[in-house]
Amino acid sequence: MGFAARVWVCGSRCWPWPQTVAAVLDRAAARHGGDLVVIEGAGTGAERAAHRWCQERGLPAWRHRCHPRLQASRGLMRLPRETLAVRHQRILRDEGPRLVVVFHEAFAPGPGVSADIARRAVAAGVPVWLVPGADPGRGRWLTAANLPGPPPAAPAPPAASPGAAVRAGTPDGPAGRAHPAAAPATPC
């Protein structure tokens, strides 16, 4: 996988144009063929469209790098910004994307998740392409000038509070499963 075309797809959780994500990934697949690796966070909107694209084309796990959020006992757990920052930095470090594509119809360089990913990628020297609408041929490169302020530092993973039931690196309850925070990407 050394020189694979590794593309991290992220964006709006309410992205209304899954066909745009598919068109951009089709174009990347036509250009890179079997070297294309799609990285996504198993979220809704743009990430769900990328996930579906990978499944429909039967990409194996090494080409479809899926990073779902931690699961709580009753569904998806909302993570604090600090934990999301650690997650984004880990994906950037471990997956080594060569391009980040942000699908967002209302992108703003503020405190949002997509802006955090874009800021971290630009700071790491990874090009970031913003697709702002339904037209897959329309977009723009994001640079440090588009993303004012330094990227937020990725904080250290939070330490478990005394008496907490789940601690990184320890079994998380009666099932004895390893804590997923340290787990690598899994096929979804």
Image (cartoon, helix red, strand yellow):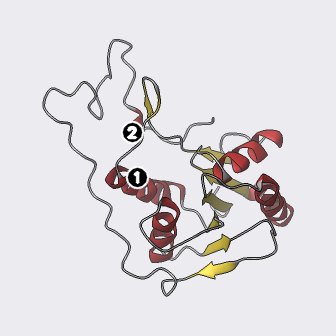
Q: Where is the C terminus found, in terms of image quarters? A: top right
- Mark 2 or mark 1: name the one nearer the start of the chain: 1
Q: Name the one closer to the observer, 68 or 35.
A: 68
- Residue beneath the point at 64% across and 58% down: 9
Q: Mark 2 or mark 1: which is in front?
A: 1
Query: Badge 2 is on which residue?
Result: 181
Q: Position of residue 120 (x, y in %)?
A: 45, 69
Horizontal side, residue 21 vs residue 154: left or right: right
Q: Quadrant of residue 131?
A: bottom right
Rendered residue at 68%/80% (across/down): 140
Looking at numbered disc 2 in the image, what kind of residue is underneath it?
Ala
Would residue 87 appear left or right of 170 to someone viewing this image? right
Which class describes the residues within 10 Å of circle 1: few (<14), some (14-19), or many (20+)?
some
Left or right of residue 133: residue 2 = left
Q: Are marks 2 and 1 in contact (CB under 8 Å)?
A: no
List x then y, in percent, for residue 31. 83, 67
Secondary structure beneath label 2:
helix
Point out residue 127 in the picture as x, y percentages from the top left corner: 59, 75
